[in-house]
């Protein structure tokens, strides 16, 4: 497969066309942003860790029955993915209260939720990705009822698999964000799964091993990304 022209450059990734209309060529960057781009920086070799971490998680999910866009790694920073028609929605899955939920409901970070909480966001940078609900999504045609049902099913199935595997690595999967697209009429998981898009806390020390180290200026960002990747990789290898 050939890497062709750049189609889209986002905050953390570049998407290239290929000579096969079924696939895109994705390159993960070291650029880091937070608070809808208001905070900018670089996390050295983040692109490498997130590329490999996404590959690892997507492969694990696929092997356990959660189909997704990942096809193969092509270099340290690049992977081939299936070409999906992305839905303009994000699902955030929460197992433990943190981040914006802690602020919204006035709860301490760390409160374990009795069951996973799913939130829906409308993907629009200019609006700062506002939180919406299913009736908004239906009313504005962002997804059909069936697509929303499938997204929720996939999110909960992925949550069970991901929570269990990271627990084996001694890590709490606090919360994370998923994105979905459609291929041949089928809703599928896309985008990335990495310390940029998930909150990971060490089970014992509660140390943050994710992008909150960048958002909150906690230091040792590169080390945390590398550690979380190697621990989860080892846990998956030992299944
Ligand atoms: P939040 O607490 O800021 O709403 O974030 C919830 C989870 O979603 C957290 O794991 C980080 C992830 N997330 C993204 O991946 N992209 C985003 O733009 C935001 C706001 C959150
Ligand atoms: N991804 C978002 C941004 O670039 C927010 C975040 O991850 O905190 O600003």
Image (spheres, grey):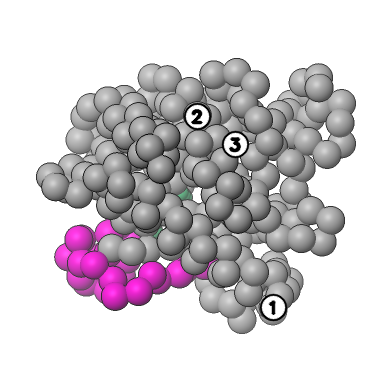
The residue to which callout 1 is attached is 145
C-alpha span from label 3 to label 1: 28 Å
Q: Nearer the viewer, mark 3 or mark 1?
A: 1
The quadrant the N terminus occupies is top right
Left/right placement of residue 33 relative to residue 174 reads: right
> What range is drawn magenta here?
97-123
10 Å neighbourhood of mark 1: few (<14), some, or many (≥20)?
some
Q: Is residue 99 above or below residue 208?
A: below
Sequence-wise first label, 3 or 1: 3
Sequence-wise first label, 2 or 3: 3
User: Which x, y percent locates residue 49?
Assistant: 44, 27
Q: Which mark is residue 10?
A: 3
Whether residue 120 appears in magenta in the rendering, the answer is yes
**Which element carries disc 1, helix, strand or loop?**
helix
User: Which x, y percent locates residue 125?
Assistant: 56, 50
Q: Is residue 75 above or below residue 98?
A: above
Residue drawn 37% across and 55% down?
163
Q: Kindly tell me whether residue 214 is visible in this rendering.
A: no
Residue found at the far left of this picture: 205
Q: Which mark is residue 52?
A: 2
Left/right placement of residue 71 relative to residue 97 reads: right
10 Å neighbourhood of mark 2: few (<14), some, or many (≥20)?
many
C-alpha span from label 1 to label 2: 33 Å
């Amino acid at each position: 497969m050939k890497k062709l022209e750049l189609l889209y450059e986002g905050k953390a990734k570049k998407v290239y066309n290929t000579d096969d209309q079924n696939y895109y060529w994705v390159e993960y960057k070291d650029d880091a942003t937070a608070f809808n781009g208001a905070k900018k920086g670089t996390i050295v070799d983040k692109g490498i860790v997130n590329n490999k971490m996404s590959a690892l998680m997507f492969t694990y999910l696929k092997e356990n029955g959660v189909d997704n866009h990942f096809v193969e790694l092509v270099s340290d920073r690049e992977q081939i993915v299936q070409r999906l028609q992305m839905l303009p929605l994000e699902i955030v899955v929460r197992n433990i209260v943190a981040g914006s939920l802690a602020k919204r409901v006035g709860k301490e970070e760390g409160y374990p939720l009795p069951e996973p909480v799913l939130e829906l966001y409308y993907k629009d940078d200019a609006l700062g990705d506002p939180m919406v609900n299913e009736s908004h999504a239906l009313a504005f045609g962002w997804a059909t009822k069936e697509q929303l049902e499938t997204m929720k099913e996939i999110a909960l199935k992925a949550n069970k698999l991901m929570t269990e595997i990271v627990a084996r690595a001694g890590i709490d999967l606090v919360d994370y964000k998923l994105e979905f697209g459609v291929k041949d009429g089928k809703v599928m998981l896309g985008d990335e799964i990495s310390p940029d898009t998930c909150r990971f806390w060490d089970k014992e020390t509660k140390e943050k091993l994710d992008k909150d180290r960048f958002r909150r200026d906690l230091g040792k960002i590169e080390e945390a990304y590398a550690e979380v990747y190697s621990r989860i990789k080892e846990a998956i290898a030992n299944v």
